[in-house]
Amino acid sequence: MNSFNYYQPKNIEDLFDLQECSADNYRLLAGGTDLLVRLKSGSITPEAIIDIKRIPSLNSGISIEADKVTFGALTLMATLESDEFLEENYPALTEAVHNIGSVQIRNRATIAGNLCNASPAADSAPALLIYDASVVCVSRKGERTLPLQEFIKGPGKTALVSNEIVKQIVMPLPSQNQAGAFSRLTRRKGVDLATINLCCQVNQTGKARFALGAVGPVPFIVEENEGLLLSTDISSEVKKSIISKLMEKATPISDVRASKEYRQAMLTVLGWRAFNTAIERLQNKI
Ligand SMILES: Cc1cc2nc3c(=O)[nH]c(=O)nc-3n(C[C@H](O)[C@H](O)[C@H](O)COP(=O)(O)OP(=O)(O)OC[C@H]3O[C@@H](n4cnc5c(N)ncnc54)[C@H](O)[C@@H]3O)c2cc1C
């Protein structure tokens, strides 16, 4: 590993000073579960590492308000996984986070780190997408809030501009007439990145939507708005074919995890699974 200067600012102003002095040749360190792998492999060689873990305004944990839930950037996957309010109101997110890495990884990995790494296979992203999450970004110039769809720009690319960081993730409280579920395909049962990850959300109004990960450059949403998937007059076979048609919007590639043909075929299988779990959850609410 190349040598670098290590800094640990104790507040956001000190962070902004350090960023300005480091002339873009720095990396932020949160949990380090992605960053350290890249540092050790030599794929990045920054002159400075700025450890943001001691900055209180990034460490606000989970806060629940009347109409929204906010996570501080440094909220750990383990914290999200064990939160009962999230499990009850955002079960697809709890399931997604529970599937990330191992207990050790979830005790280090942060939610903002997962989004800023911008892997197409990031497990938190599809769940955050179906729950309409936004990302609060901050720099010395001020704050701005971006819908998650606009935040992830491509593999390894986000909408963050120079010296801007993620401060919080915000999700509106979901209405009672919707339900969601997460589904994931991996090559093995142990620790592995997703070959596909997917969330489904169904709504009593008839709307069904799927957020898809690892089958395109960025996680994205496909929707069925005509109420066909929630109709009781339509057979399972027809519903599966509707899901299959929706999944044609994916653009999977072949890589070490799977061929594009296998990914495309499995999207319908995972979509059908998540759809049925979401429907079951919706019926339990009625
Ligand atoms: C063994 C192993 C298994 C894994 N399994 C999974 C898995 O199953 N699913 C999955 O989705 N991921 C997995 N990961 C990836 C990783 O754990 C997650 O992406 C994690 O959430 C990254 O968070 P972090 O705090 O560790 O980020 P870091 O590694 O500290 O940072 C990641 C990137 O984000 C930037 N960054 C961090 N915080 C901020 C911020 N607030 N503002 C701006 N930039 C920021 C950093 O500069 C860096 O570029 C795995 C990793 C390992 C090593």
Image (spheres, rainbow, N blue to C red):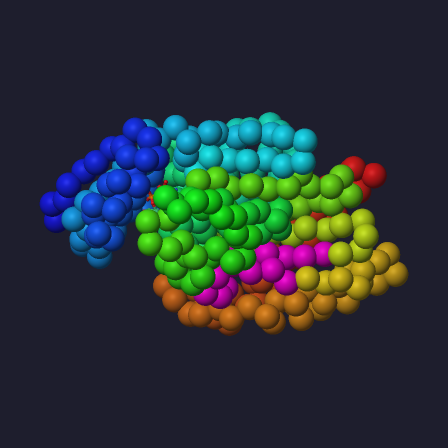
- Is 83 rendered above or below residue 170? above
Q: Quadrant of the C terminus?
A: top right
Residue drawn at 84 percent across, 58 percent down: 231
Q: Quadrant of ligand 1?
A: top left
213 within the magenta span: yes
Residue drawn at 37 percent across, 55 percent down: 161
Q: Residue furthest front?
A: 141
Q: 77 left or right of 267?
A: left
Q: Which residues are magenta?
A: 208-222
The overriding secondary structure of the stretch rendered in magenta is: strand
Q: Position of residue 104 (x, y in %)?
A: 36, 33
Q: Position of residue 65 (x, y in %)?
A: 63, 30
Residue drawn at 78 percent across, 37 percent down: 285
Q: Can residue 267 be seen from the camera position used here?
A: yes
Q: Position of residue 35 (x, y in %)?
A: 29, 46
Q: Can residue 269 be seen from the camera position used here?
A: no
- Is 202 rendered above or below residue 81? below
Q: 120 left or right of 27?
A: right
Foreground of the two, 52 or 231? 52
Q: 31 left or right of 238?
A: left
Q: Residue furthest left?
A: 3
